[in-house]
Image (cartoon, helix red, strand yellow):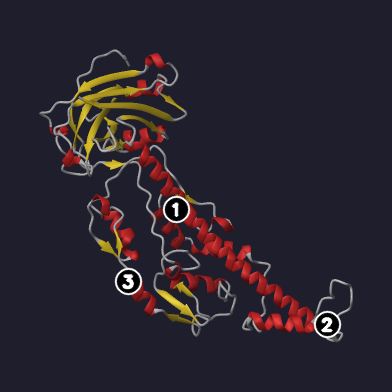
């Protein structure tokens, strides 16, 4: 690769049928009253038990096949006589309407929570924005031993519904020391406390003996104390479920916070954006196998309320031995306040991370007669502007441009 070689920039159109290698992580958090305590997701085909708890029908069926008792309060349950369809809750969930996550991009469709994932997959406003970093979502059962992580909430939902058996095993192992007799599980907590206190009273702090009568039935005392321990274990189990839900919510909050920070950096970078493409080898292999696969950078701004651009890197359709590198204009809420077509200077710099003097730099000026610089009519302008043969693929891989499996491309866009 010759860093000083002069290349001519031209307008280029992204081929039809492109797919992006990075995907957006979305979350769909149900309210607690609509959440299944087993899979921690929206109640699907909800049922209610005689002890007053709600579950997905498939979740409680699998649970009872392994344990035979309620996962919340350990009361023995039978699928035939203790489980009933909860049509009221089902109607409530079906009446819920959630806006599409891409409403800000123009989608006005509202669907039920259970249909949201299906809609997202086919939403016409679900335009991919590749990110230089991906955040993997841990399984909701991580606290009890599941080590799986996922790229998206949809992947985790599929895992929760397809791997119920293993999750049941994790929960059973976590509480394997709790042994509860069927004849004592139906008694109330207050009754157990009262019975235990009536059987035995601890001596006071001054060392004086208790004024109550000596206990004559040792087995009754042991039984009462044992039942009290069971009650405390049940409370701990409920707390574990609450902690698991809080961990899930904190994880979603962390993802949202990271996205908010990234959005701020992109809006205030003043047209000077550094695109770090991590996991580069795997991405390159995917593009070499399918030349319609492309990498898009996040959209960045020339000023907080200015023009918005993204960068596209892909295998050249004219020469499969080379990379193509283009910029694309993107829609913003301030387009009506901007001057069109865009006029400015665009500079690319592919950073050589071992020898800075070998960094490849190229500058091009916008052309007001091209569609690529006119006001965008779609989320991302189909036509880009740049180089169809920017760099030889083998030179980029061998000559120090990739370090720690990361390629860095610096873009500077200035209005004139």
C-alpha span from label 2 to label 3: 55 Å
Q: Is residue 383 left or right of residue 310?
A: left
The part of the image, by quadrant, that contains residue 14 is top left
In which quadrant will I find the C terminus?
top left
* Image location of residue 241, percent across then percent down: 55, 64
In which quadrant will I find the N terminus?
top left
The vertical placement of 9 against 242, above or below, is above
The part of the image, by quadrant, that contains residue 288 is top left
Q: Is residue 3 left or right of residue 209?
A: left
In front: 319, or 249? 249
* Image location of residue 46, percent across then percent down: 41, 74
Q: Would you name the residue on which mark 3 appears?
A: 94
C-alpha span from label 1 to label 2: 52 Å
Q: Which residue is at the far front? A: 206
The answer to whether residue 151 is visible is no
- Classify mark 1: helix, strand or loop: helix
Q: Is residue 406 left or right of residue 167?
A: left
Q: Is residue 46 left or right of residue 82?
A: left
Residue sitting at 19 percent across and 19 percent down? 8
Determine whether label 3 and label 1 are within 8 Å by CB.
Answer: no
Of discs 1 and 2, which sits in the foreground? 1
Sequence-wise, the earlier of marks 2 and 3 is 3
Sequence-wise, the earlier of marks 3 and 1 is 3
Residue sitting at 40 percent across and 70 percent down? 44
Q: Would you name the residue on which mark 2 appears?
A: 218
In front: 168, or 189? 189
């Amino acid at each position: 690769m010759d860093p000083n070689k002069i290349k001519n920039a031209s307008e280029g159109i992204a081929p039809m049928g492109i797919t992006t290698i990075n995907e957006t992580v979305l979350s769909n958090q149900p309210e607690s009253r609509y959440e299944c305590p087993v899979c921690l997701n929206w109640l699907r085909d909800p049922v209610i038990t005689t002890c007053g708890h709600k579950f997905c029908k498939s979740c409680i069926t699998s649970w009872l096949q392994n344990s035979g008792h309620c996962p919340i309060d350990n009361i023995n349950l039978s699928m035939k006589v203790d489980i009933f369809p909860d049509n009221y809750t089902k109607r409530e969930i079906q009446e819920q309407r959630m806006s599409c996550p891409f409403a800000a991009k123009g989608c006005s469709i509202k669907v039920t929570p259970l249909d949201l994932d299906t809609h997202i997959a086919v939403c016409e406003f679900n335009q991919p924005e590749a990110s230089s970093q991906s955040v993997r979502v841990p399984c909701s059962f991580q606290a009890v031993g599941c080590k799986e992580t996922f790229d998206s909430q949809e992947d985790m939902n599929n895992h929760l519904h397809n791997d119920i058996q293993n999750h049941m095993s994790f929960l059973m192992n976590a509480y394997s020391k709790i042994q509860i007799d069927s004849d004592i599980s139906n008694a109330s907590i207050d009754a157990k406390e009262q019975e235990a206190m009536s059987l035995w009273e601890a001596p006071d702090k001054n060392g004086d003996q208790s004024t109550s009568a000596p206990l004559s039935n040792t087995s009754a005392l042991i039984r009462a104390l044992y039942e009290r321990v069971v009650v405390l274990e049940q409370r701990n189990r409920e707390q574990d479920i609450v902690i698991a839900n809080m961990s899930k919510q904190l994880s979603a909050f962390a993802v949202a916070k990271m996205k908010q920070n990234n959005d701020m950096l992109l809006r205030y970078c003043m047209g000077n954006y550094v695109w770090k493409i991590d996991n580069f080898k795997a991405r390159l292999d995917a593009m070499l196998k399918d030349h319609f696969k492309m990498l898009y950078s996040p959209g960045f701004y020339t000023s907080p309320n200015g023009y918005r651009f993204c960068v596209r890197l892909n295998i050249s359709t004219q020469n499969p031995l080379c990379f193509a590198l283009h910029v694309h204009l993107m829609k913003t809420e301030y387009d009506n306040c901007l001057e069109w077509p865009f006029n400015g200077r665009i500079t690319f710099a592919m950073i050589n991370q071992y020898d800075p003097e070998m960094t490849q730099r190229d500058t091009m000026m916008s052309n007001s007669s091209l569609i690529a610089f006119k006001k965008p009519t779609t989320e991302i302008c189909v036509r880009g502007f740049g180089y169809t043969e920017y760099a030889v693929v083998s030179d980029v891989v061998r000559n120090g441009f990739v370090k720690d499996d990361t390629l860095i491309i610096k873009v500077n866009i200035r209005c004139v």
